[in-house]
Image: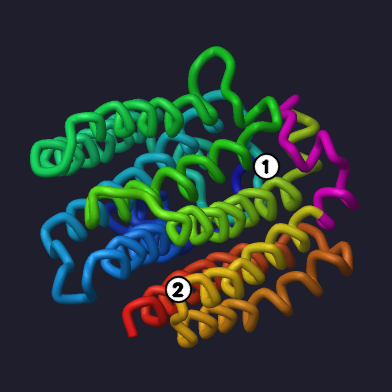
Amino acid sequence: MKTLESKGSTDLPSGAGLWIKGARLRTLPAAMAPVLVGSACGIYNHGGIHKLFVGRFLLAAVVALSLQVGVNFANDYSDGIRGTDKDRVGPLRLVGSGLVKPKKVLLASGICALVAMGAGLVLAIYVSWWLLLVGVLSILAAWTYTGGPKPYGYLGLGEVFVFVFFGLVATLGSQYVQGHGITETGIGASISIGFLASAILLTNNIRDIKGDLESSKKTLAILLGDFKARVLYSSICTLALLMAVPITVATKRPFALTALVGALPLVKAIQIVLKRETGPALISVLQKTSLAELLFGLFLTIGLLI
């Protein structure tokens, strides 16, 4: 069986279009949110926008984006060879659909990791060598999510690691390279970004409960059960947004409260989730949650800089 987008279709992408589909570019805007917010927190504590280290910001963005694409390819490869993606609702899977050989997808993931390592090395040279350790741990976390003998994504720990690496590490790391320090503002912002990033993965796992059960993949959604997983999604999304209030008060930047614009797509997303919608209906929730993370990050960034 093929993924939903490849079943019975006569207009499947090929060449570059196929790889673009596999890279899941829709996940990239959300990957930029921690870089934007973390950089803004660093700038806020060190004298304003004129203190922005543009080169460091761009390098941090390269690290975040290349790691995100690398994770997407790595998951495609690992789930594909395990057979988890044989009957999957959602974006096209290169290996699971049989359109691309597993070794090519693995190579693409490796190239992305090398790009991230290269950009991270330059950052380490200019900022601090301990960033190399952070980079190595991030790459290991990306691979062992669904790869290796005991992938933590199959043990219900996916959302925890996403919270840590795509929330705390990505946001606070971006702050650190801008201002050589981590602050309470940065920690609060990183928690919000981490919750939203985890909510994206949780939505994906709620959607795939049936298929994951059949392939013995124990995600957090399976361990909690459908209803509790949906309540958790709604709770962490709400908490993420509410963090904008103490950040606004602590920084005395009233425009930081505009980060609540992220609630616009989340209201509908939470309604869909709590109505117990399944399958394709949850794809729109993924899109709305990703948009919410981007909007929250973008407006919080602007608010901290005004």
Q: How many labels, in total?
A: 2
Identify the mark at residue 24; answer none if there is no mark.
none
Span of residues in magenta: 216-231
Residue depicted at 71% across the width and 67% down the height? 238
Lateral position of residue 77 relative to residue 222, left or right: left
Q: Is residue 2 left or right of residue 226?
A: left
Say which amino acid is labelled 2. Thr
The image shows residue 106, relative to residue 13, as above or below, that is: above
Q: Secondary structure at mark 2?
A: helix
Where is mark 1, residue-wise? 87
Q: Nearer the viewer, residue 82 or 41?
A: 41
Q: Is residue 99 visible?
A: no
Is residue 222 inside the magenta stretch?
yes
SS for dot 1:
loop
Residue 230 x, y percent position in the rendering: 82, 56
Q: Which of the pair 127/287 is nearer the observer?
A: 127
Most common secondary structure along the magenta stretch: helix
Across and down, in percent, residue 86 comes to: 63, 37
Q: Is residue 159 above or below residue 62?
A: above
Q: Residue at x 48, y 53 (%)?
A: 187
44 and 23: which is toward the camera: 44
Q: Nearer the viewer, mark 2 or mark 1?
A: 2
The N terminus sits in image quarter: top right
Residue 144 visible to an observer of this rendering: yes
Counting from the top left corner in percent of width and height, residue 186 is at 43, 57
User: Three-letter amino acid code at disc 1?
Assistant: Asp
Residue position marked by numbered label 2 in the rendering:
251
Front-most of 186 and 258? 186
